[in-house]
Image (spheres, grey):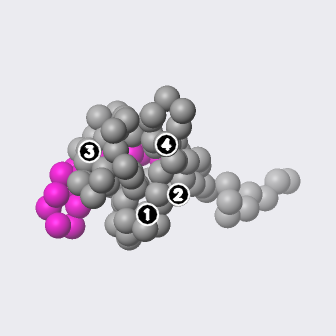
Amino acid sequence: MTSYGYQKTLRAVNFICQAPQAKSVRLVGDFNGWNPAANPMKQMPDRCWLLTVELKHGHHRYAFLVDGVLTLDPRAQGITRNDKGERVSLVPVS
């Protein structure tokens, strides 16, 4: 019999932001308390910004902070609102 550890409940999710002219892009969401310092993204050679985050099963609200401006993810599975009523993106993790 196999026992499944806690780490099995996490799934790696790739976040990609198309903002080639940005000086900085950060990932904020309910998984990091909307903390701008928690998840800085890395600019790749093609000028896209990338970050992989391990998330628990469920739906997560998030957005990109592009040079400090809250920005929706056009690739998101949906749009919802955060606790401040701002429009944010939604990603399901299963």
> Which is nearer the eye, 3 or 41?
41
Residue 53, given in percent of the width and then of the height, sits at 54, 53
Measured in 3D between alpha carbons, the distance from the residue under mark 1 to the one under mark 4, in whole angstroms, is 22 Å
The span shown in magenta is 80-94
The amino acid marked with disc number 1 is Phe
Badge 4 vs badge 3, beta-carbon distance below 8 Å: no
Q: Secondary structure at mark 4?
A: strand
Residue underneath mark 2: 56
The amino acid marked with disc number 2 is Lys
Residue 32 occupies which quadrant of the picture? bottom left
Measured in 3D between alpha carbons, the distance from the residue under mark 2 to the one under mark 1, in whole angstroms, is 9 Å
Measured in 3D between alpha carbons, the distance from the residue under mark 2 to the one under mark 4, in whole angstroms, is 25 Å
Residue underneath mark 4: 43
Q: Nearer the viewer, mark 2 or mark 3?
A: 3
**Looking at the image, is 64 positioned above or below residue 17?**
below
- In the current view of this chain or complex, which residue is farthest to the top? 46
Residue underneath mark 1: 31
> Which is nearer the eye, 94 or 44?
44
